[in-house]
Image (tube, rainbow, N blue to C red):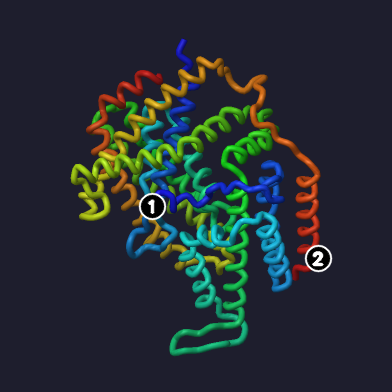
Amino acid sequence: MMEKMIFGRYIPGDSFVHKLDPRSKLVFVFLFIAIVFLANNAVTYAVILAFTLVTILLSRIRLYFLINGLKPILFLLIFTFLLHIFFTKEGDLLWKWQFIEVYEEGLRQGIFISIRFLVLVFVTSILTLTTSPISITDGMEVLLNPFKRFKLPVHELALMMSISLRFIPTLMDETDKILKAQMARGSDISTGSIKERIKAVVPLLIPLFVSAFKRAEDLAVAMEVRGYRGGEGRTRYRQLKWDWRDSLVIVTLGILALLLWWLRS
Amino acid sequence: MKNNKLRVMIAVAMLSSISFVLMLFNFPLPALPPFLKVDFSDVPALIAAITMGPVAGILVALFKNVLYWFFSGSPTGVPVGEMANFATSILFMLPVYAIYRKVSNTKGLAIGLLVGILAMAIGMSVLNYAVFLPMYTYFLNMPALTGSALRDTIVLGILPFNLIKGLLLSAIIIVLFKTMKSWLDKQRAQFS
């Protein structure tokens, strides 16, 4: 059950997308989110969809993983699609059954929104499927570096983020263990009235908090012993390298933006 | 020679992970729109605020939402839901922290929670009216909610949702604090 919940699982590989620098991938995703909103007619949505499919092919991620990741939000996708179908009443009437009326404009908007939704989810999942969370954090730290001038503690934030990422699997395991330990004692979290469930949640939370603070203490001691003293002048174990692929990706994205700007109505 | 800053940073990171894991166990309430979900991720944020100060609490709320966005993506691309969640956490947490710091007993906690619920419910109604709902509909390209539809969504959706969520959270927090009072006081003494 725990395994299924992690949607942003990193799948190691050596495809074109895997080899990209995390910085270029992050810049790509953030710009892409903005560029998608340029699309507003059939041609532009087709271009965006084709571009995304090429990206998926280049990442060599099996479609199974992408579809699997879509499951939790499938409901939202259908919900917004239906919302458009039923509430946009413009254009020609296409289909009518008793009180249900489907209009051309509603169907069009519904399809467009679903494409946008899918494309955004696919591209952000490709980022998390081909980049380990730790290199995403490294990339973000470098990209946010200019904000140090405004007293933003970039290094500290990145450190907290990477520690937090590092301990998510550990804490999930621990949650699982505590859950089972409580179940063995006869506590039941998934049935009963709301009051009973709340009572069952508390014995789950207490051991989690206590062990989190204990771990923090241990880790702080371990870091001090190894001479940790903040980000100033610190050298890196994981080096980031920007090569021709990264420049190519950013240039391609620029071309896509220009193309959409030219094709949009 | 205790480096407290490092200790606080690491504890914040750990609590953010817990908060994120709790956020994954979210569930919608019956009869309310599906984008309104209850989760208990505000509990670690409040623990952080009470033991290590308001900045630590705000950071936990921030990290849990960044992590959530990393791991689940956002249907609108732009994380509107995560921003709203961040605002909710802060509105709920800060009054509880401020009052509990002055009156550190069950009574102070109860009053703090009450003020927190009200701040969250009223604040989120206003913010949804002015910012989040228009943003949400804009990014999903839905026809914008206006006039009575917008008011209905807030009065029948957002307001009762936040009240119920606040009550559920408060119930857990009161039981939790009763059991953990001495441990929490010890942590507070260590970090201040």
Residue, x 46% and y 67% (percent of image)? B149
**Observer-nearest residue: A147 or A122?**
A122
Using the rendered image of the protein, determine whether residue B86 is visible from the camera's viewpoint: yes
Whole-percent x and y of residue B59? 49, 35
Residue, x 46% and y 48% (percent of image)? B85
Rendering quarter of residue A172: top left
Q: Could you say whether the residue bearing mark 2 is in a helix, strand or loop?
A: helix
Q: A139 above or below A148?
A: below
Using the rendered image of the protein, determine whether residue B122 is visible from the camera's viewpoint: no
Which amino acid type is shown beneath numbered disc 1?
Met
Residue, x 51% and y 16% (percent of image)? A224
Say few, some or many: other residues with alpha carbon within 10 Å of mark 1 (under 14 / 14 to 19 / 20 or more). few
What residue is shown with label 2? A262
Q: Is residue A130 left or right of residue A259?
A: left
Q: Residue furthest left?
A: A186
Q: Mark 1 vs mark 2: which is more N-terminal?
A: 1
Could you tell me which chain the residue with mark 2 belongs to?
A: A
Disc 1 to disc 2, C-alpha distance: 47 Å
Q: A56 above or below A202?
A: below
In the image, which disc is placed on residue B68? none
Whole-percent x and y of residue A31? 70, 51
In the image, which disc is placed on residue A1? 1
Which amino acid type is shown beneath numbered disc 2?
Trp
Residue, x 43% and y 26% (percent of image)? A216
Could you tell me which chain the residue with mark 1 belongs to?
A: A
Q: Is residue A196 left or right of residue A82?
A: left
Say few, some or many: other residues with alpha carbon within 10 Å of mark 2 (under 14 / 14 to 19 / 20 or more). few
